[in-house]
Image (spheres, helix red, strand yellow):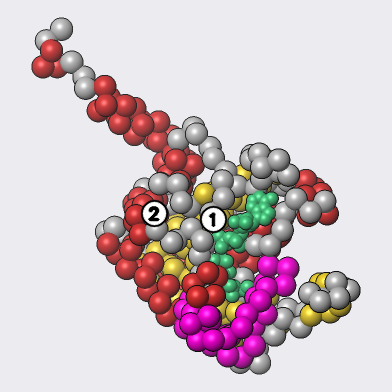
Amino acid sequence: MNSKHAPDPALLAKAETLVEALPYMQRYAGQTFVVKYGGHAMGDPEAARDFAEDVVLMKAVGINVVVVHGGGPQIGAMLKKLGVESHFVNGLRVTDKETAQIAEMVLAGSINKEIVGWISGAGGKAVGISGKDGGLVLCEKVGDTRAPDPNSGIERNVDLGFVGDPVKVDRSILDTLSQSGIIPVIAPVGIGADGHTYNVNADTMAGAIAAELQASRFFLLTDVAGVLDKQGQLLTDLDPAAIKILQEDGTISGGMIPKLETCVKAVEGGVDAAVILDGRVPHAMLLEIFTKRGAGTLVRR
Ligand SMILES: Nc1ncnc2c1ncn2[C@@H]1O[C@H](COP(=O)(O)OP(=O)(O)O)[C@@H](O)[C@H]1O
Ligand SMILES: CC(=O)N[C@@H](CCC(=O)OP(=O)(O)O)C(=O)O
């Protein structure tokens, strides 16, 4: 064979990867994917660029991609800077009026626009909104939650303050944006019928939106490989019954509690599958969607 025409193995591997992606691209065109981008996953600028490229590529092959972001660590850093004390109960931040204002500033102000900028830098068109815009997410104040007192250890009811539970999602603004080729980027802040601003756990917000959109896939990008068992091994497939056991036996704690509750609600609400992925892994979503190498924890009914 003429050596000039001998295929370069590296190029051939690239071509094979593209061909491997073809059936997935054909299958997913026209479907809706909701991506929750967690505050822990967005720390590294290079990973953020990879994330934005993944989102833009998904949109380019015809997937209606909707991004909902978090920012817990970034809110924590700002509260610390401002000398405001903060703590979490069962994975939710106790939110007084001042904390709600600071959370909105960090989420809907700086982080939201930063993500819009990354997507724009990757050649996509994004519009940043919060759950307050266009009547997207109506919230109710979450009820008191049972938790042990940090001093005595005795269980008592805790009022979480302005923490919201999404009770109604109006998808019209998302449809308008998506149909115009725009990727909506949503900050987890909602409005109550009482006019108050509510701080919403970003997983909860994303799950409510994924259910309303009847999304085919709901990705939750975080800072762990997925759900780990007590020995630290990755659990690749879970259903609601298995998740209940993990919660009862204390395998999952902290932010993983609302994350998995959200996955259960989403799949029970009509989402085909939720996937918890390590957002720090370069192009984690592309590998999950367009290749045979599934990663993370898949939650299905
Ligand atoms: N069984 C578990 N498997 C994996 N992570 C767990 C588990 N239990 C608790 N976690 C914690 O949940 C965290 C992810 O939730 P969270 O901090 O809310 O992330 P994010 O900001 O990305 O939403 C992990 O970093 C880990 O510390
Ligand atoms: C009520 C509540 O806990 N709200 C969260 C909102 C941000 C969030 O959920 O961000 P991550 O996804 O990065 O954790 C908070 O104040 O931290």
Q: Quadrant of ligand 2?
A: bottom right
Q: Position of residue 263 (x, y in %)?
A: 66, 56
User: Dot 2: what SS?
Assistant: helix
- Identify which residue is drawn at 40% across, 77% down: 110
On the question of residue 64 being in view, the answer is yes
Q: Residue furthest top?
A: 1
Per the rendered image, the range of residues in magenta is 78-107
The one nearer the camera, 180 or 239, is 239
Q: Is residue 228 above or below residue 126?
A: above
Q: Residue furthest front?
A: 151
Q: Is residue 104 magenta?
A: yes
Which quarter shows the N terminus?
top left
- Identify which residue is drawn at 46% across, 51% down: 280
**Residue type beneath disc 2:** Ala
Q: Position of residue 251 (x, y in %)?
A: 75, 50
Residue 199 placement: quadrant: bottom right
Dot 2 corresponds to which residue? 47
User: Dot 1: what SS?
Assistant: strand
Q: Is residue 284 above or below residue 130?
A: above
The one nearer the camera, 180 or 289, is 289
